[in-house]
Image: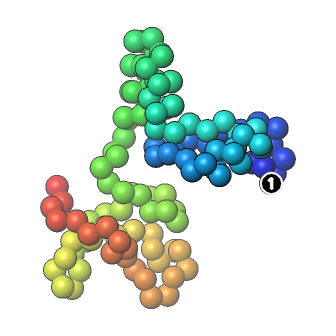
């Protein structure tokens, strides 16, 4: 936002921000929302707006990880060693020559 000269912006994190990050945000007119501020803002909503917000946030499959490259949901796959892993069905279109699945998030049980 700062490098693009955006007049005002915001950034959310479910964690927290370091002192230097807070100072950078302050000097660049970026409003930051850490975990505490997100919860505090949500709790200020009336019951109707809370319900609408929760319905929007919880609509969809949030248990299955998504590919950071293409955004598609991973699929479970068994490796040659018999381990279950999350695999991107579109990995062949990413331009990788030797990677056909992600093994970063091993899984034990797939439903």
For label 1, the residue is 3
Q: Is 105 drawn above or below residue 35 in the view shown?
A: below
The image quadrant of residue 103 is bottom left
Left or right of 77? Residue 22 is: right
Residue at 18%, 60% (x, y): give it: 110
Q: Where is residue 19 shown, x and y percent of the image?
A: 61, 48
Q: Where is residue 20 shown, x and y percent of the image?
A: 65, 52
Residue at 37%, 35% (x, y): give it: 59
- Total number of numbered labels? 1
As rendered, which of 91 and 23 lies closer to the eye?
Answer: 23
* Name of the residue lying farthest toward the front: 19
Residue at 66%, 36% (x, y): give it: 31
Q: Where is residue 3 shown, x and y percent of the image?
A: 80, 54
The image quadrant of residue 90 is bottom left
Q: Is 44 drawn above or below residue 37 in the view shown?
A: above
SS at mark 1 in the image: loop
Q: Is 9 drawn above or below residue 84 in the view shown?
A: above
Left or right of 48? Residue 25 is: right
Q: Is 67 drawn above or below residue 43 in the view shown?
A: below
Q: Which quadrant is home to the C terminus?
A: bottom left
Q: Where is residue 98 shown, x and y percent of the image?
A: 45, 88
Q: Residues within 10 Å of mark 1 (few under 14, many from 20)?
A: few
Residue at 55%, 80% (x, y): give it: 95
As rendered, which of 101 and 48 lies closer to the eye?
Answer: 48
């Amino acid at each position: 936002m700062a490098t693009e000269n955006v007049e005002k912006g915001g950034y959310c994190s479910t964690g927290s921000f370091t002192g230097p990050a807070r100072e950078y945000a302050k000097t660049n007119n970026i409003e930051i929302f850490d975990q505490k501020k997100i919860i505090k803002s949500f709790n200020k909503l009336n019951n109707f707006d809370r319900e609408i917000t929760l319905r929007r946030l919880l609509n969809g499959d949030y248990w299955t990880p998504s590919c950071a490259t293409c955004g598609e949901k991973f699929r479970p796959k068994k490796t040659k060693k018999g381990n279950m892993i999350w695999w991107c069905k579109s990995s062949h279109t990413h331009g990788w020559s030797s990677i056909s699945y992600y093994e970063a998030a091993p899984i034990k049980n797939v439903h």
